[in-house]
Amino acid sequence: MKEKLLSLLLLCVVLAGSAHAQTRKISGKVTSAEDGSPLTGVSVIVVGTSAGTQTDAAGNYTITASEGAQQLEFRLVGFQSTRIGLGQSALINVSLEVDASTLDEVIVTGYGTTTRRDLIGSVSSIKTDLLTNRPVQSFDQALAGKAAGVQISIPNGVLNNPPVFRIRGTNSISLSSYPLIVIDGVPTFTGDVSGSNAGGNALASLNPNDIETMDILKDAAATAIYGSRAANGVVVITTKKGAAGKAIVSYDGWFGVNQVQRLPKLLDAFQYTEIKNEGLVNAGTFSDNLQYRLTIGPDGQPINTNWYDYAYRDGLSHSHSLSIRGGSESTSYYFSANVTDQQGIILTNDYKRLGALFNVDHKISKIFSVGGKLQYTKQDNLATISSGSLSGQAFGTAGLGRIAMINAPNVAPFTNDGEYNLTGNNLGVMDNLVSQIGFYNPVVLIERNRSFNYLNGIQANGYFQAQPFSWLTFKSLYGIDYLYSTNDIFNNPIHGDGFAGGGSATNNYTARMRWVWTNTLNANYTFNNAHTVTALIGTEQQRSTDRRFGAGRTGLSDPEFDDFSASYQNFSTTGSYGENYLVSFFGSLAYDFKKKYFVSGSIRQDEYSAFGPNNKAGVFYSVGASYEIAQENFWENAGLDRVFSSFKLRGSYGTVGNQNGIGDLASRTFYEGGLFGGQPTLYPNSSGNEDIGWETSKKLDLGINFGILRDRFTFEMAYYKNDIDGLIYNVPQAPSAGLPSNPQLNIGSMYNRGVELTVNAQAVNKPDFSWSPSFNITYNENEITSLAPGITQFTSSTSSLETVSISRVGSPLGMIYVARTAGVDPATGRRIFINAEGEQVYYDHSLPVAQRWQYADGSVAPGIGSVDQIAYANPQPKFFGGFINSFRYKSFDLALNFTYQLGYYVYFGTGASIMDQRFWNNSTDMLRRWTAPGQDTDVPRVVAGDNVSNGSATPLDIHVYKGDFLKLRDVTFGYALPLAVLQKINISRTRIYVSAQNAFIFTGYPGTDPEASSNGGSNSSQGVERNSVGNGRTFTVGLNLTF
Amino acid sequence: MKKNKILLIVTTGILAVTSCRKEDWLNPVSVDQVEADFAFTTPDRIHAQVLGLYSALKAGNFYGGRYIVYNEVRADNYINLTTNAVTAYLVWNHTTSNNAQEVTGLWSSAYQTINRCNLFIDGMANGGNEVVGAEQAAYYVAEAKLVRAISYYSLLQLYARPYWDGNGSMPGLPLRLTGNLYAGDYDLARSSVGEVYQQILADLNDAEAALPTNYSSAYDNTTRGHRNTAIAFKTRVYLSMREYDNVISEANKIVSTSAPFTATSGVNHALQDDIVNVFSNYTTTESILSSPMNAGTDVVGGQTALGSYFYSVREYYLNENGIIADPNWRLTDRRRALVDTATLAGTPRSLMAKYPTPSPYVDYVPIIRYAEVLLSLGEAIARSSNSVDPRAVALLNYVRQRSDATTTFTVANFATPQALFDAFLHERNIELLGEGLRSPDLMRLGLDLPAKGTVSSVSANAQSYIWPISQTELLYNNLMEDN
């Protein structure tokens, strides 16, 4: 069967190439010097020619060399490259030494490659084995803690939601702070491209197992070549390519189960009924006709519903990737296919992907080569009901995260007759004598609604390359990134959001299409064995269009149907078109003297369609230098070389820009058409700014890198400062000015500065046992230095409803903004608030409205409101990082990867939801409520209808907690089957493993997840968690096979 | 080597082509919007802008629904069912804060409307007049002034103390009379209540003088301002100012001296035989100005539409101790047909049913109706003369008997002028239920906002008698002061 599959796949590939001159065959076996195990995939090259092959699964190779050939070179990442002179023997067996040094590691930078030794800029390379075989949907979800300066937070437990991805702090206010992601030379779409209740991260098109290299460019020296798009850093990814040699087939698969964790504990039906009645009594409204009551269920027992059971599940997931890579001396290929089907912790939240990637490279002649890539991915992002977790959903009536908490536990989803339990468009009250007992009945929505997103993505490119001299390369690459997003949404007419309209169906369609054409000329010349010059010039054009249309229908004629195509009474349509175009010229020049002194410079001009006519072109540049002291004679004379294998000082400065998020037509002022009674209208709808341009980030980076004991330990330290000027800010005009929109002006300024430290070690490296820990930590400090004349602060709301974030000049972006409290009055059980004047104000919801707020002396006080809120705590972590450990003992391997964030606060808004004294169910904290004078407690007296005392009306300090956490993000334990067994069945490597994601969270934070955020990737309202679903815990078992 | 030469030529070709760029792509134009500089260039665009003024008024936060809802639920006729903070619960509960979305949303929406009027008036003066001709231009500008006046008046009802408090001397609104389209310094202090009222009257007087007497269709007569619209609105404004003589002189322009009371010039406003018709046939001469709703093109949504609040989604039911409890509002009164019943949580409740159509909510939203003018006139006559005036009683009786022929008011029914004043307030409460006038009526008379359900009454001097000022206005207008 395996043979059949292979032969079918290989049919796709045309193998070419033949030898003409007098040749001879050489063969042999390559093993590891460490343990003698055969090494697979070692590149074997005849030095001075392009002839090369790879070792097979058993470490064997056969290569044809011309008679004049002198040496063979053997290369494998992680081992020292070795050259062996050719004698008469046709058999050459080699054992390769493990290479602890990373200085020769290849780094893919903008429009070229370099090595860590030559690198001046600040670049983190991610080991791809940290990204693969993880139960994630997109590679960025797996990046947390993997590189210094990179902060990843996964804001909720909805599958395929894009993580918050920050490099060296939040570097914008109004534009995107997401880095530029370049995959195989094409800047790709990022962000949530789903329009449904499921997440749709554009980056999930790329199967993490197809990633060959990932380099994160951080400072100006590394990023300035990307000009106006580089302020948030650049992530450069290349996908796997083929290599000469026998085809290597790999299979990677896993099965997993995904579980919810750390849900708040809630009152049961008995506690709920008692406490809510107590609230009615305290309010003075308890009566025969107004009270909460238990309902006897069909089993004769009082109904006691845990609504979590109707919201969450153990999700089952599996994933399979199959790849084939190989090639001849002139043509190489990589093909992979992947399928994954994942169930989220939220009922009906599924993610499916089906993808294939084909990379081919071919040398036409000594000078010319061509190649290309074709990747197609289909993704299904499926949900029914809103989880209440994606940005903007926090207060949605249908938000499952919230209704699972606050729906009353003393009613059931079904009546005793088995019908849906409904009262009007809410959950049915059953025997309770109150008008409302819950929001929607989630069971109806989960059974009957649909919120599906389908993504079809095509990423393709083709290149033509000419290398007339060994030191000069011209390359022309044309690439496309097309992403088609289709939504199919249905809300049933019986219950929920579709109720008022008698059922509704929405279909909409977005086509994002981008092409990029890049032409570069690269020169790399060394003369006198001392001076190396690297030069690059290039041009690039990029054009993107975005066309959307959609239709909504309401008033379903026949409730039997639920499709958009059924018969409905009403319809409405939407449509939009956007386009932008970037034209760039760039160049860079680097020089080093004897790998000791390095200098570099780069420059780029970007002309961008969205920039205003007065600011059409931006020029960005960087300069950098580094100094490898370990190459100096005095270093050796001082004996320092015995300790330090390398010691490099480096620094860079430059300007880069950010334009991601400037509206395509932001410079223009428009009137828009609408309808009034069906007749056309025209009205002002946007205030433009003809001066609008890029945000400028001036980046300074100073670093020391050193390795000790032959690089067995390496340290990288960097100080950085990003001064951002011309921050685009939608300068709020007084609402009474009546402007159609707040104009975007390049007006604000802000900085991020910090220190990064990475320590890598080969702590133990014995034949049978090794331990390689890697630790990184980043300290970051953010401060807004100016906004706009006369404007010293602005607030940001969560889901347009709760204003709990404030950004002030002189403070970090998005401080948590709450009113202060001073506990609960033991005498009366009233919550004590502190107003703007610092006075204590008591609140008693049972009094007539005008008297509810009182000073201690009983006189009436003004109510606590937004004027009493203060900038209370910083939601941006001061420290974050990771601790990555890989252990190997004989055939066993163990990975323990931690991530942490420290020194920040989270507003646990959910805490306010589950202490609200309307019909809402409460946290078991309510069992501590004040009930008798003299009682010392932190939970006030319950009064029916009270939405003030516990923070629903005005956000309060009682719900602000330290977010500090340490997560065991992933732990993997694997075992590689003995080779002797495998070779008999023609398999070179079999590894089985078990793994857990988010296995443990060490935190004092009381909510489900201190990473959770209701505002997605928002810059100015981080650290707010309201009614969302946290990240689950996933256990997987997996298998890696190599043939 | 020949192959290599060809390829070298290809290389050079690519290098040459790549330096070209498309200027059109670098300077894209909108495919769906009109550049501001070209908004006044054709008669069609200018006409569309006039309708755009009304569509601003019709915004969900304003006369599309919520302005009416807020003024209804602040008063005593409703009980909140859902405690939902996004459907006016805080308004009903008198607990709105500066950043409550009701407070910020309506403020912005009203000022957007005002700014559209200002931009339009400016744009007409700067070239628009020539495009449509002087006569048409005068009509259009008068419509803009009418919409501006309605907007300022409506803001005063929620964000400023009533006129009687200090005789207009209390803080009113930032008075903006020129259009704003670009970033700028927009700090502006509040004018007094009296100054804002003077501007409203100036606009309405201009509008009355310049508006057409009528349009060619009943639809336009109801959805756009004409001369009688401006006059009718003035009766409301003067009543709020307690300038009863002016109410009388304005109302008399459009109310005949004796029954049947009708407008004798311009649009012939008159009560319809059956009030129920007014809420299903939206363009009768009784509806002086309404916001039209058109299924499929421009309706307001749930949580905004009157029908969703009071009838379909049932956010509020009618307070059993409110006006529906009045035994003298006879069960046979046709206005009772606009009250429906439903069983909510096992209890029979009454629903305000003037806007019964479910989503899409196509029931028109009344802005001013002729019955109000008649009642305002009658009340003004009685209060102005401080007597049980026979014409006042006749007006009261006219409105009552349209719906309840079995009740007849005579002068003898009212022992004192105050009894007649009370009867007018009472009649307005029945007749105009659901039309957003209850709270302004109570406030213009300095009456408490009565208790209802679990909510206590709010006295006329309480802070929560009016709303706080929008938080965003306080933040970004440095000269603004809170209530």
Image: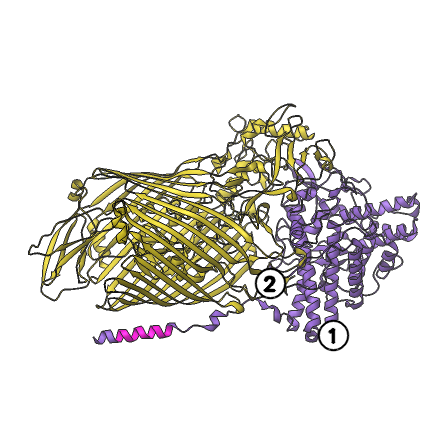
Chain colours: A yellow, B purple
Q: Nearer the viewer, mark 1 or mark 2?
A: 2
Q: Is residue B244 magenta?
A: no
The chain that hosts pointer 1 is: B
Residue A233: x and y in percent read: 42, 55
Of residue A58 and residue A896, the one placed in the foreground of this image is A896
Residue at (25, 62) in percent of width and height: A530
Amino acid type of disc 2? Ser
For disc 2, the marked residue is A687
Of residue A88 and residue A635, the one placed in the foreground of this image is A635
**Element type where label 1 sits in the image:** helix
The answer to whether residue A420 is seen in the rendering is no
Query: What is the spatial separation of the Cα atoms under label 1 and label 2, in whole angstroms?
Result: 29 Å
Number of callouts:
2
Q: Which residues are magenta?
A: B6-17
Q: Is residue A823 left or right of residue B78?
A: left
Relative vertical location of residue A588 with respect to residue A236 in this rendering, above or below: below
The chain that hosts pointer 2 is: A
Residue A286: x and y in percent read: 67, 29
Residue at (63, 25) in percent of width and height: A931
- Res. B134 mark: 1
Amino acid type of disc 1? Ala
Q: Is residue A304 left or right of residue A154?
A: right
Q: Is residue B243 left or right of residue A723?
A: right
Residue A91: x and y in percent read: 9, 52
